Image (spheres, rainbow, N blue to C red):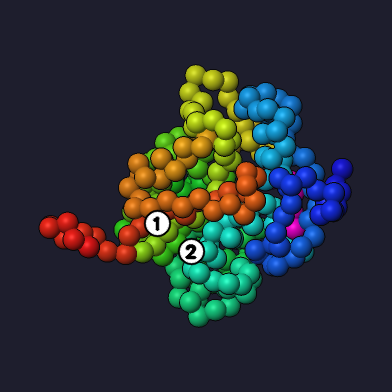
């Protein structure tokens, strides 16, 4: 059942700021998790609640869910743009930006595709662990809830870093269970995200990310990692930054 979320009765954890994609302030919600997935993931009721918000609470204006809005928020913070994403794509700075999108980043894909430097590829047809692009080809790499399906997440992030120019950034979301550490699902029963009954092998989960998600970013060679909370703990996005310059032999920047 879909219902309109009313701010005056909302739990504090799910109160939402205006949508960073379109600026709207009305949201609808429906639960998306099912009992088998909750059990496989080992989620508490509170964890299931905020992941349902992450995936199932959406802006009525543009249809973006919380994870997509968090990703838009990260992009706007990285560009220091005090506007919505729909406004940003019309700016000169945005139109100079070369963006690689790996899988559709939720509802952001249609907006990002308006940019002349936008390139969309789809995983697993395009292997995220071996991207078919030369080094330093893009200013931004964007992906949303894709990394958990890549067999080697660190290698996937390392490839994202390789194709970024100095000063560039990889902006992404993954489902994060903030009260635990990251674990691989090797040796555990197969878990498939998507929808109940889905058997699409490309949606098999290889990594369940926890509070140490930032470690994978730094292990893959990025110079900085920022965690952007559009709405903690439901709406988190990461900014994996490449330094604008490299140190000289003497260690000076």
Looking at the image, residue 182 lies above or below residue 252: above
**Which quarter of the rendering shows the N terminus?**
top right
Q: Residue furthest left?
A: 250
Asked if residue 131 can be seen in this view, the reply is: no
Looking at the image, residue 226 lies above or below residue 116: above
Q: Secondary structure at mark 1?
A: strand
Magenta stretch: give its range: 55-59
Dot 1 alpha-carbon crowd within 10 angstroms: few under 14, some 14 to 19, many 20 or more: many
Residue occupied by mark 1: 241
- Image spot of residue 112 (x, y percent): 57, 66
**Which quarter of the rendering shows the C terminus?**
bottom left
Q: Earlier in the sequence, mark 2 or mark 1?
A: 2
- Disc 2 and disc 1 in contact, CB within 8 angstroms: yes
Which secondary structure type mostly characterizes the magenta part of the structure? strand
Residue occupied by mark 2: 78
The residue at the point 70 percent across, 33 percent down is 46
- Image spot of residue 26 (x, y percent): 80, 60
């Amino acid at each position: 059942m879909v219902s309109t979320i009313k701010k005056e009765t909302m739990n504090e954890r799910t109160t939402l700021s205006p949508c960073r994609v379109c600026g709207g302030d009305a949201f609808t919600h429906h639960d998306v998790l099912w009992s088998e997935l909750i059990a496989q993931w080992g989620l508490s009721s509170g964890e299931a609640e905020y992941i349902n918000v992450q995936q199932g609470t959406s802006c009525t204006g543009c249809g973006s869910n919380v994870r997509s809005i968090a990703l838009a928020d990260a992009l706007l913070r990285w560009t220091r743009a005090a506007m919505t994403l729909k406004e940003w794509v019309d700016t000169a700075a945005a139109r100079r930006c070369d963006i690689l999108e790996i899988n559709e980043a939720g509802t952001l894909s249609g907006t990002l595709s308006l940019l002349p430097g936008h390139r969309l590829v789809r995983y697993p047809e395009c292997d995220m662990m071996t991207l078919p692009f030369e080094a330093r080809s893009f200013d931004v790499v964007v992906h949303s809830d894709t990394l958990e399906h890549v067999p080697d997440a660190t290698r996937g992030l390392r490839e994202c870093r390789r194709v970024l120019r100095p000063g560039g950034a990889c902006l992404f979301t993954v489902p994060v269970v903030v009260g635990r550490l990251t674990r691989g699902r090797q040796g555990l029963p197969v878990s498939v995200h998507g929808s109940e009954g889905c058997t699409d092998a490309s949606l098999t989960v290889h990594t369940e990310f926890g509070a140490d998600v930032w470690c994978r970013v730094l292990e893959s060679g990025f110079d900085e990692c920022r965690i952007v909370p559009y709405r903690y703990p439901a709406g988190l996005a990461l900014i994996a930054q490449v330094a604008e310059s490299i140190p000289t032999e003497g260690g000076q920047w």
